């Protein structure tokens, strides 16, 4: 059995038994940057929607709430405890300083809008909460940007899981590359739109950045 098969089987068994509570728990762990891949959990959730174990919108709701709770944990560590605490936490979950620096670079370049469009980039989707917290981003703004990105991500991957639910073999193949490729190709256009939004938001936050001095 391949690793993807094993992860799929584990997730399917867990979510089949725990239902919405399992989706909420796993997505909370994923949102807190623990090694729980939403790219597997959400399509499996969609598969369970396909076979009528779960319903689509309640599944999206609990997945999104779990993701928001998890990302608030990371944000709070940065916001209240600072960068040293982020690094200490990161060592416990095998998060390197290099990974954190990448997220910090995104946040420094794109401002608070990075919290939104980073949600569509593997690894960065959860890491972005740390620099946002360290930078003391307004909590309401962080929650709003995070919620939009998380909900869109969850809807897309759960729906792709529904589409892939024709049979078990299609799910296994998708975990070996088919579904992520389709999903990321679809998300590519969305990310371009979000990048344009990021530039607009950045200019609003720094209205003088594009004006020459004097």
Image: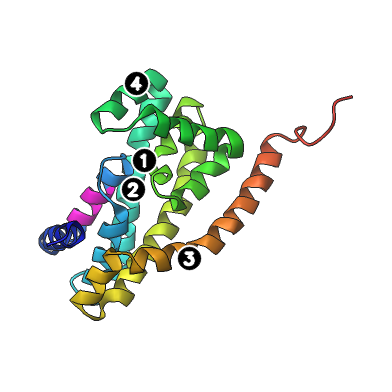
Which secondary structure lies at badge 2? helix
In the displayed structure, 175 sits above or below 198; it is below
**Camera-nearest residue between 156 and 65:** 156
Q: Can residue 39 be seen in this view?
A: yes
Q: Where is residue 155 in the image (x, y as percent from the top left)?
A: 39, 64
Q: In this view, does 164 lie to the left or right of 135?
A: left
Residue at the disc numbered 2: 67
**Camera-nearest residue between 37 and 72:** 37
- Depth-wise, is mark 2 or mark 4 nearer the camera? 4
Residue at 45% x, 46% y: name it.
146
Circles 4 and 1: CB atoms closer than 8 Å: no
Which badge, 2 or 4, is on the more N-terminal residue? 2
Which badge, 3 or 1, is on the more N-terminal residue? 1
Q: Can residue 49 be seen in this view?
A: no
Query: Magenta stretch?
Result: 22-27
Quarter of the image for residue 97 reads top left
Q: Is residue 1 left or right of residue 66?
A: left
Which secondary structure lies at badge 4? helix
User: Which mark, by number, is residue 85?
Assistant: 4
Circles 1 and 2: CB atoms closer than 8 Å: yes
- Depth-wise, is mark 2 or mark 3 nearer the camera? 3
Which badge, 3 or 4, is on the more N-terminal residue? 4
Residue at 37% x, 20% y: name it.
81
Residue at 45% x, 50% y: name it.
121
Q: Position of residue 185 (x, y in %)?
A: 48, 65
**Camera-nearest residue between 194 and 145:** 194
Which secondary structure lies at badge 3? helix
Residue at the disc numbered 3: 185
- Alpha-carbon neighbours of circle 2 within 10 Å: few (<14), some, or many (≥20)? many
The span from disc 2 to disc 4 (Cα, nearest Å) is: 21 Å
Q: Position of residue 47 (x, y in %)?
A: 24, 71
Residue at the disc numbered 1: 71
């Amino acid at each position: 059995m391949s690793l993807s098969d094993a992860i799929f089987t584990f997730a399917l068994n867990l979510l089949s038994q725990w239902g919405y509570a399992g989706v909420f728990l796993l997505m909370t762990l994923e949102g807190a940057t623990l090694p729980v891949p939403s790219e597997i959990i959400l399509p499996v959730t969609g598969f369970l929607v396909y076979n009528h174990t779960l319903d689509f919108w309640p599944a999206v709701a609990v997945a999104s709430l779990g993701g928001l709770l998890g990302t608030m944990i990371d944000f709070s560590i940065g916001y209240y405890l600072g960068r040293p605490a982020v690094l200490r936490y990161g060592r416990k979950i095998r998060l390197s300083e290099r990974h954190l620096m990448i997220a910090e670079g995104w946040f420094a370049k794109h401002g608070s809008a990075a919290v939104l469009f980073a949600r569509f980039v593997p690894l960065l989707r959860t890491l972005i909460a740390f620099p946002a917290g360290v930078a003391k981003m307004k909590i309401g703004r962080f929650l709003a940007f995070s919620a939009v990105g998380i909900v869109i991500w969850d809807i897309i991957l759960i729906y792709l899981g529904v589409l892939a639910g024709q049979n078990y073999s299609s799910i296994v193949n998708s975990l070996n590359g088919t579904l992520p490729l389709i999903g990321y190709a679809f998300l590519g256009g969305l990310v371009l739109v979000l990048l344009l939004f990021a530039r607009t938001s950045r200019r609003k936050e720094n209205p003088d950045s594009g004006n020459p001095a004097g």
